[in-house]
Image (tube, grey):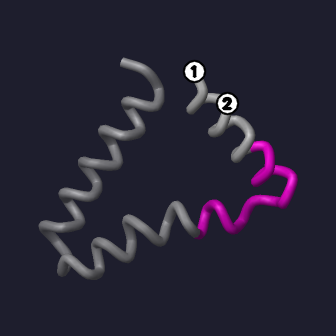
């Protein structure tokens, strides 16, 4: 299993656990808010690099 697949599986597991313990709107805020907050903490150069790598992988 690749590293990205492990991360995705962990994210799905955490999302399901959050839906069980929290109301759906709170779980949705956490699931969407954490990656958005992480992206906003990057420097502009890191954001450019992340976008470039993502576009390059889409063209494979």
Q: Residue 10: x and y, percent?
A: 33, 42
Q: Which residues are magenta?
A: 37-49
Residue pictured at 20% horizontal, 59% vertical: 17
Residue pictured at 26% horizontal, 81% vertical: 25
Residue 60: quadrant of the picture:
top right
Q: Residues within 10 Å of mark 1 (few under 14, many from 20)?
A: few
Q: Are marks 2 and 1 in contact (CB under 8 Å)?
A: yes
SS class of the residue under badge 1? loop
**Magenta stretch encompasses residue 38:** yes
For the N terminus, give its image quadrant: top left
- Give the residue at mark 2: 56
- Give the residue at mark 1: 60
Residue reaching furthest to the right: 45
Q: Residues within 10 Å of mark 2 (few under 14, many from 20)?
A: few
Q: CA distance from mark 2 to mark 1?
A: 7 Å
Q: Residue 40: x and y, percent?
A: 68, 68
**Magenta stretch encompasses residue 5:** no
């Amino acid at each position: 299993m690749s590293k990205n697949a492990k991360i995705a599986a962990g994210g799905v597991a955490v999302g399901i656990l959050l839906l069980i313990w929290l109301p759906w709107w709170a779980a949705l805020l956490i699931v969407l808010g954490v990656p958005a907050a992480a992206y906003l903490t990057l420097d502009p150069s890191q954001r450019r690099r992340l976008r470039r790598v993502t576009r390059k992988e889409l063209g494979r």
